[in-house]
Image: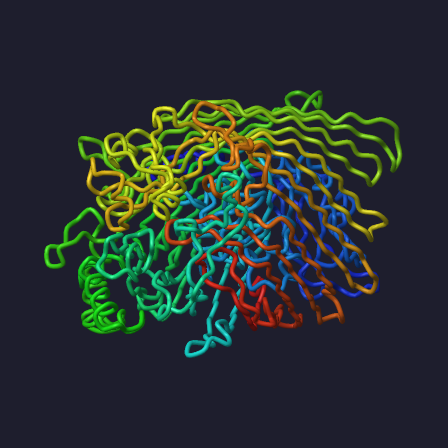
Amino acid sequence: MKHISFSFILILALSVTSWAQTVLSGQVTDANDQPLAGVTVLIRGTNTGTVTQADGRFSLSTEKELPFTLSVSFIGYRREEVVVRGNNFRAIDVKLAEEAITADEVVVSASRVPEDIRKAPVTVEKLGARQFANSPAANPFDALQNVKGVDLLTQSLTFKSVNVRGFGANNNNRFVQLTDGMDNRSPGLGFGFGSVAGISDLDIESIELIPGASSALYGPDALQGLMLTSSKNPFTYQGLSAQMKVGLNNVGKSNFGPKGYIDMAVRYAKQIGTRFAYKVNFQRVSGTDFIADDYDDRSTGARTGFFSTDAGQGGVATGIAYVPNNNPNTNFEYDGVNIYGDDINNAGAFRFPANYGNAALQGKLVTRTGYTELDLLGNYGRVYNNRANVSLHYKVGRNMEASVGWYYGNGNFIRTAGFREYFPDYRRHQFKAELRGDNFFLRAYTTQQRAEGWNIGQTARIMNTIWKPTSQWADEFGQAYVENKVSIQEARAVADRGRYLPGSPDFRFVRDGITSVYNNERIALLNTTGTRFRDNSQLFHYEGMYNFSQLLHGVIDVIAGSSLRRFLLESGGTAFPRRADGSEYTINEFGAYVQASKEVGFGTGPDRLTIKPTVAVRYDKNQYLQGGFTPRASAVVSAGVHNVRASWQSAFRNPAPGQLFAIPPTGQAGEVGGLPQAYNGAGLNTNPGYLQVEVTPYQSSTGAAVPQPFIIDPTQFTTEKIKTWEVGYKTLISNRFYVDAFYFSSRYTDFIAAQNVFQLLTPGADVSALLTPTSYRTLQVNFNNKNEIFVRGAGIGLEYGLGRGYTLSGNYAYQTGLITLRDARGAIRNDRAGVPVVKRKMSNPEVSQLGRNFFISPENRYNISLANPRLTDRLGATLTYRWTDRTWVEQGTTAGDVWLPSWSSVDAQVSYRVPAFKSVVKLGGTNIFNQYYAQGYGLARIGGLYYLSITFDELMR
């Protein structure tokens, strides 16, 4: 912060000279000469702007020399560009024509410079005021669910993960989220927080999204894409804005719902004089989360006999054989999806010996009785989120603007990684200082977080063990089942006598005792370690860019930039190991890039042909990994309204801090990083584990091959890489029919995929100990596999103006993931039938049988919308249908392997404008028919979300 504050003081000292002011004034009307209120009037290429008043009039002061161009825009109308000269600046009259489709959006994310979205060199999507207003989604971030190819995975009511182009993850560290240019991800945990710690809804100006490789300009981790959320500049958007929203969810839940929620937000922005402006934002959301209450028997490859196999073809998998039995009273191995402590692969089960006294239990696996997620949380699903921001802006001269800002996020949420983890009070501060001109920017910011959470599954396992060791519980179960000849239900009841009952004082005492103590500290009273961890890591990021185009007088457009990042990990040994001297690890990263482009034109008139080739290259280096270059080449050919683009791109991903350093607590399951510090720290160098996919057949039949130790060389751990080529087409025909289509093909190498490995708790024990679930722990070990992964996909978005304000729009996206399996030496692996696995779908059973690949992506999905923002001069409405294909999921330690069924949702909204009060009343809902569906295995199932909001915009201007 000292560096940032000092930099800003220098910025403010740069200029004390004043320039002559030009005061613009005018009026904006529609085709019928009726005044339009709320129209945005912006001096093109700057942040200087205003909005029209109730009579359509506006006034604007600027130091910019005449002539210049005003950009005038309003939802539902065609944007107009007006040249302001010395003879008209005091009486600027603008008429806006209604237009259902607006395709002349300007984006900056594709090339780091402003450009027409139709001529961007790569696929890019943009959501702005028009999309936010028309969307039935409850907030701007959720509107992403209508963008083609985007999978928005709901972790909590306030926490959603953005996924594009395969390898869907609850914690997507292959996708970069930027908030006003700042990395939105957790410095230590490595995943983007979305709206948990983002911008207040009222302050979001736009969201730009690039699906696909973006490292050439944005550096590491933009492997699958980038999202840039931009806030409103206080020079342009002034006055008081406020929003009150009330709603319902969890409708139809027996003995639980429905539950209400409240969302309140306020924004105030003010310009003082001609140079200074500030804004203040605050938003609070409180309610009840969607509940993870899937109590079906868990589908997981850790079960014996999980796959159906063909004995005549070497036991190759042909499908899923395991048939869930959802009744714990008749199922020895019942393992509920959102019930914990009963997990078959997390020491929640006991296998009776093959020579057990009663034949009915010989070799039988029996799971313990677990606790539901609601039982363990003990908060009735309550969720809250606070977001705040204060920004100060100062115009330094005519073409530069300096700003400092504070961004704050706080709330509780659940995330799903290897386990479900609860964060009861997450807090994050970001501080930024920036100097931006017409052709450059300098930015420095820091992320400071306080994140403490606890592992839900491990807490349940430890609670069961404290109350009664698994071996004792199994003895009592066996005696009751054999001697008394009772049912499974009755035997469980006998073994469970005296168990901590959810909500009881003993239950709360033990749970709170475990979850309040760190996982590397001992609880003497309970004779165990805690399950709490912390990540108070910090990030310091310094970057800048310069556009040399003016210096080169239009001969060629060149930009160059560089970046320096420093991570200070701080977990106290609870999430990452410490150095030998007890200090925490740091991570330093450096990057630099250059891009050159040139547009060449042929002919004149509206059908003029232009060709714009662009090349870019970037170099990045992480102190623990080998550095590398990521080039990109693209070209856009435009002829009239038709725009064709083609690109070849490369990208890479630095492993997240957890994938580098993570070590689970002694004796507990968890993630293991890929560096030697983590691999050796988990004892895998002296006590190697065994792959789950090799152990499971051995557990089901002693005649199966004895599993061999899984050994890798952690010194070879490196970055994950991708190369992608893509073609696309965009057009707007007769201002009525909009088309945006693309096709891409990607190839991954050095892919980082954590595999489940069983490590014996007693080093040197015989491999037969793997037959007893309590004798080993499950580790998710990160490493680079040698497989070749191919992802191919296509998408198309269509929008058609039906007339009278109606638009019919839709989009469709397809993608599939193929894999060629290779062993540690690079040789192609065979499936169990002896056939080489070359470019096969990762969801095929014979491929999954050999190990997880985590593609987790629906093959098909589409959206269809009918909208009219002006049914009358005050009334607007939207109706949307979304459909997503079934998805093969391989996820976590206590999640599983399963086909999630396809799902659909009908969303709708009706809005009513009250111009006299500058307000909009909106009634809306998503999944209005309340058909519950899951976007991930073990995640909360999503039902209807219904809301009523009133928004007052730019009062007291």
Examine the rendering and report whether any part of residue 587 can be seen. Answer: yes
Q: Which x, y percent locates residue 351?
A: 28, 54
Q: Which x, y percent locates residue 924?
A: 61, 70
In this view of the protein, which residue sits in the foreground, 192 or 601? 192
Which residue is drawn at the image coordinates 55% and 39% (left, top)? 224
Residue 770 vs 899, above or below: the answer is above
In this view of the protein, which residue sits in the foreground, 343 or 18? 343
In the drawing, does residue 823 fall left or right of residue 879? Answer: left
Residue 51 vs 564, above or below: the answer is below
Which residue is drawn at the image coordinates 22% and 70% (left, top)? 480
In this view of the protein, which residue sits in the foreground, 733 or 389? 733
Given the current orientation, which residue lies at the most extreme left position?
524
In this view of the protein, which residue sits in the foreground, 349 or 191? 349
Q: Quadrant of the C terminus?
A: bottom right
Examine the rendering and report whether any part of residue 95 can be seen. Answer: no
Q: Which x, y percent locates residue 482?
A: 24, 67
Q: Quadrant of the N terminus?
A: top left
In the drawing, does residue 858 fall left or right of residue 606? Answer: left
Which residue is drawn at the image coordinates 24% and 45% (left, top)? 665
